[in-house]
Image (cartoon, rainbow, N blue to C red):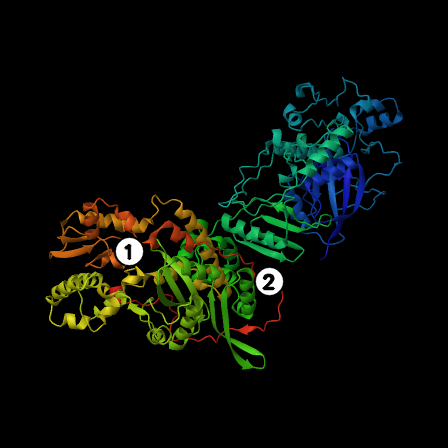
């Protein structure tokens, strides 16, 4: 990093002669050495004038390096900034100081009288407005400045003006109130004894010029005096017409930055650091009265200490959560990355093109890309506090807004919309693009939005290789935090210490114990694809709880779905749940690849049911129509053989061969009339597995450990919530069971009953298109409709008989639906697990992910379903 060191050369205690060739006459000069070019500001320069004790300072002028004939009046920090940018290391910057107390021109004769001592008290101060052409006492001076007279000048000639001593204050000079040069602020301008028009003297802002004697009329001295007087009058007239409020400057559509005010008054006057131009108290620079006077500097030490302490407490720290970016001098950022992000956020909010023309780890300078726009912002690391701090700022824009911005790139979008993508990882690219257009009013290309979304997903999904490497460590931490849990990792040994992932199985102890204590003996098996980089599959085993909701038992990740992987998975589940050969067990499936063969091999004595929805999807490819579809569901839901035959006859009337086509699927696997009554569950589909797969949809997009952990956390939270849900039950029976009970009770109103005098009843049901008579045995708790035995909830016919005997049907609902059984299933809790960063280093060998198989065509996000299943 390179710094520019300059020298400030002050010209003071003289007078500035305006005009086309302005020059500073008389006074003294003072040098300020070794000044950083970034340091000068309006307030800093005024502080120097107080340090050097320059009296009655009115205004400051700077002589540019390349325009020696044109002085620049310092009104704002921008005036200094424009000239500072042109300076090089070692340059000297000339500053002319004008004073509020007027300096006067006198005739040489009267000046000689003053030197003689008789009338020395009649003048406040004297100086010349015309430099001597043949001066023999020239000293080194910048262009446009008169040589400074030596302390002991030679006696002046009677025909030439002379340099008077340095200006004195009024109280020191002893000026008479009757003097022609009295410039008291309390006197009226009309009392001036000048022979010229009063308008000239009025517009000279109190600067009264002594007129030479009549004998000099027409001489060079007189002509020069008239010229200087006219120039001074024009300058003072122009200055009086200058607007003091610069808020109406035409700066284009972009405008001034928000929350920028040049003047702060009232209780906000102590917020110095917010004001643009300095971190000290701000004063309006458009008029001389705004600068601090000598009287304002006479504060006591106690007051100065209080003000300094008050300023120190007002440290400005950037708030990353702020909606609108506002820049202030002294604003502190915690790092250069935070400052760069704030610049990008500001550029997109303001709609302006900004470039980082200096972008280094220790300093950043940004400016508007429009060539005529003065907006600039510079920040660097502070040497004292080591904070990244704003040190230069010009808030004015003179450019136009645009709907395209280079800083609206994928890096900025990834940070700005991270929370929304995390909450909605399935958000489409076009949806994110529309969101950016609505919020930022910016046009962003599709590829940019896609890259931003990919960066966020990569961050939240995880690192594929890193997570596969620590799969053994995850197994160990899971067994450590949840004892008695079954977790199996299978790998393929490739030799040379290289192990490739094959499969992963987990059955948490809470799920294992809950199923054995509080669940019916029915398990649904299903599989789904994972949507991450590795195209592996997830196999699940799900049961139903007392409220007919899903109860996940175990899940496994395998490379492919075939008879070998299903056999391995079923063996793991059988071992954990102690199913043996599957006697008194019902398996529901979607007819997955290899599952039928695996069930026959592992659970040979179990009842295997097929999902009726999949059978309908295959059968309806040849037999379409809503009427045929409704008849199919009537056949599947028939609880007895007689009712099934009635619906098959109705279906057969629609077209010849339709029943034969349906019965090619074994009716004992999908029709309720042939189900086993011991399981107390009459489901005819495998929706419990589909529900679980949809429940973990967001997790299926992530890498292996992240996905497994998200599933475990969802199960852990679900157990606690369902236990609380049990406290809201009105009855000691689950709400879903009570709904079935109330529906059966409504149907019982259309039944008639005949009693044999013992415990058997004959009930006639007229709710169907055909009248059926059923026999209800209250002692055996059976009904020929088989619905009571299948569900464990009294059917309409049984409820009719119970009402006939004044019995409460709720007492005959199976214990599987009671609250006590429901709470037993959720009696064991899943324990929390720390994340990967908290795990200790182990000696387990790393595991490589399975080889990524590149499939032809565009990757599919959703499985193509059959028409009947949609």
Q: Which residue is mark 2?
A: 839
Establish if 571 lies above or below 737.
Answer: below
Report the disc number at residue 354.
none
Apparent side of residue 241 relative to residue 554 in the rendered image (left or right): right
* Image location of residue 80, percent across then percent down: 67, 44
Of residue 216 and residue 609, the one placed in the foreground of this image is 609
Q: Quadrant of the C terminus?
A: bottom left
- x 85%, y 22%: residue: 119
Q: Residues within 10 Å of mark 2 (few under 14, many from 20)?
A: some
User: Eyeballing the image, is 777 above or below 122?
Assistant: below
Quadrant assignment, res 72:
top right
Give the crowd class for mark 1: few <14, some 14-19, many >=20 residues within 10 Å.
many
Instruction: Mark 1 or mark 2: name the one nearer the start of the chain.
Output: 1
Which is nearer the eye, 110 or 235?
Answer: 235
- Taking depth in this image into account, of 803 and 349 the one nearest to the observer is 803
Residue 313 appears in the picture as rendered: yes
Count every numbered label the image shows and give the total: 2
User: SS class of the residue under badge 2?
Assistant: loop
What is the quadrant of residue 171 in the picture?
top right
Foreground label between 1 and 2: 1
> Is residue 371 in sight in this rendering?
no
Q: Residue furthest top?
A: 178
Determine the secondary structure under disc 1: loop
Q: CA distance from mark 1 to mark 2?
A: 48 Å
- Residue 439: x and y in percent read 44, 49
Pointer 1: what residue?
792
Return the residue nearer the eye: 199 or 353: 353
Q: Where residue 146 sits: x, y (%)?
A: 78, 41
């Amino acid at each position: 990093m390179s710094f520019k060191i300059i020298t400030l050369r002050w010209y003071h205690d003289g007078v500035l002669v305006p005009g086309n060739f302005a020059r500073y006459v008389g006074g003294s000069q003072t040098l300020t050495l070794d000044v950083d070019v970034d340091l000068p500001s309006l307030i800093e320069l005024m502080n120097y004038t107080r340090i050097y004790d320059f009296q009655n300072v009115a205004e400051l002028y700077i002589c540019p390096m390349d325009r020696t004939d044109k002085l620049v009046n310092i009104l704002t920090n921008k005036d200094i900034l424009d000239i500072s940018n042109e300076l090089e290391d070692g340059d000297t910057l000339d500053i002319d100081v004008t004073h509020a107390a007027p300096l006067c021109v006198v005739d040489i004769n009267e000046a000689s009288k003053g030197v003689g001592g008789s009338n020395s008290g009649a003048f406040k101060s004297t100086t010349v407005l015309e430099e001597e052409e043949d001066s023999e006492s020239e000293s080194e001076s910048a262009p446009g400045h008169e040589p400074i007279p030596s302390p002991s000048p030679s006696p002046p000639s009677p025909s030439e003006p002379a340099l008077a001593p340095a200006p004195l204050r009024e109280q020191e000079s002893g000026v008479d109130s009757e003097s022609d040069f009295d410039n008291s602020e309390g006197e009226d301008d009309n009392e001036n004894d000048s022979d010229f028009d009063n308008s000239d003297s009025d517009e000279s802002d109190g600067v009264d010029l002594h007129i030479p004697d009549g004998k000099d009329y027409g001489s060079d001295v007189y002509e020069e005096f008239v010229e200087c007087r006219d120039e001074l009058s024009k300058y003072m007239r122009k200055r009086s017409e200058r607007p003091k409020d610069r808020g109406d400057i035409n700066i284009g559509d972009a405008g001034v930055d928000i929350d920028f005010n040049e003047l702060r008054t009232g209780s906000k006057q102590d917020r110095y650091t917010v004001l643009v131009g300095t971190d000290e108290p701000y004063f309006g620079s458009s008029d001389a009265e705004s600068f601090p006077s000598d009287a304002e500097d006479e504060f006591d030490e106690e007051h100065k200490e209080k003000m300094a302490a008050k300023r120190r407490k007002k440290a400005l720290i950037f708030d990353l959560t702020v909606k609108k970016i506002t820049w202030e001098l002294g604003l502190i950022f915690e790092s250069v990355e935070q400052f760069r992000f704030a610049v990008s956020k500001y550029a997109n909010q303001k709609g302006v093109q900004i470039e980082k023309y200096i972008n280094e780890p220790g300093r950043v300078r940004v400016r508007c890309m429009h060539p005529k726009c003065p907006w600039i912002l510079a920040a660097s690391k502070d040497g004292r506090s080591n904070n990244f701090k704003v040190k230069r700022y010009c808030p004015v824009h003179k450019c136009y807004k645009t709907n395209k911005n280079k800083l609206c790139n994928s890096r900025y979008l990834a940070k700005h919309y991270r929370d929304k993508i995390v909450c909605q990882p399935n958000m489409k690219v076009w949806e994110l693009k529309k969101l950016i257009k609505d919020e930022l009013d910016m046009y962003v290309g599709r590829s940019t939005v896609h890259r931003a979304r990919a960066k966020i997903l990569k961050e939240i999904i995880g690192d594929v290789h890193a997570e596969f490497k620590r799969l053994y460590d995850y197994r160990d931490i899971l067994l450590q935090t949840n004892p008695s849990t079954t977790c199996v990792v299978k790998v393929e040994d490739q030799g040379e210490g290289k192990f490739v992932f094959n499969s992963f199985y987990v059955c948490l102890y809470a799920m294992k114990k809950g199923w054995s204590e509080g669940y019916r003996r029915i398990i649904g098996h299903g599989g789904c694809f994972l949507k991450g980089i590795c195209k592996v599959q997830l196999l699940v085993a799900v049961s139903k709880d007392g409220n007919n909701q899903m109860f996940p038992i175990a899940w496994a990740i395998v490379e492919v779905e075939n008879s070998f992987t299903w056999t391995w998975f079923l063996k793991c589940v059988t071992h954990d749940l102690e199913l043996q050969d599957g006697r008194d067990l019902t398996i529901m499936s979607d007819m997955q690849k290899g599952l039928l063969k695996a069930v026959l091999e592992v659970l040979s004595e179990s009842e295997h049911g097929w999902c009726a929805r999949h059978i309908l999807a295959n059968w309806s490819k040849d037999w379409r129509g809503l009427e045929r579809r409704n008849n199919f569901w009537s056949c599947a839901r028939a609880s007895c053989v007689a009712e099934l035959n009635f619906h098959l006859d109705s279906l057969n009337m629609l077209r010849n061969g339709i029943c034969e086509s349906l019965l090619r699927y074994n009716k004992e696997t999908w029709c309720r009339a042939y189900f086993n009554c011991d399981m107390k569950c009459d489901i005819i589909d495998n929706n419990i597995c589909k529900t679980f797969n949809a429940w973990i949809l967001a997790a299926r997009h992530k890498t292996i450990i992240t996905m497994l952990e998200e599933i475990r956390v969802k199960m852990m939270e679900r157990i606690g919530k369902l236990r609380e849900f049990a406290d809201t039950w009105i009855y000691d029976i689950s709400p879903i069971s009570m709904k079935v009970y109330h529906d059966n009770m409504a149907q019982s109103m259309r039944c008639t009953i005949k009693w044999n005098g013992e415990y058997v009843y004959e009930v006639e049901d007229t709710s169907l298109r055909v009248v059926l008579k059923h026999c209800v045995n209250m002692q055996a708790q059976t009904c020929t409709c088989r619905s009571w035995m299948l569900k464990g909830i009294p059917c309409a016919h049984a409820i009719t008989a119970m009402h006939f005997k004044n019995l409460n049907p709720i007492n005959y609902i199976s214990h599987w639906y009671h609250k006590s059984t429901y709470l037993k299933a959720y009696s064991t809790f899943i324990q929390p697990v720390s994340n990967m960063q908290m795990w200790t280093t182990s000696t387990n060998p790393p595991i490589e992910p399975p080889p990524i198989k590149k499939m032809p065509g565009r990757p599919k996000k959703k499985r193509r379903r059959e028409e009947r299943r949609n």
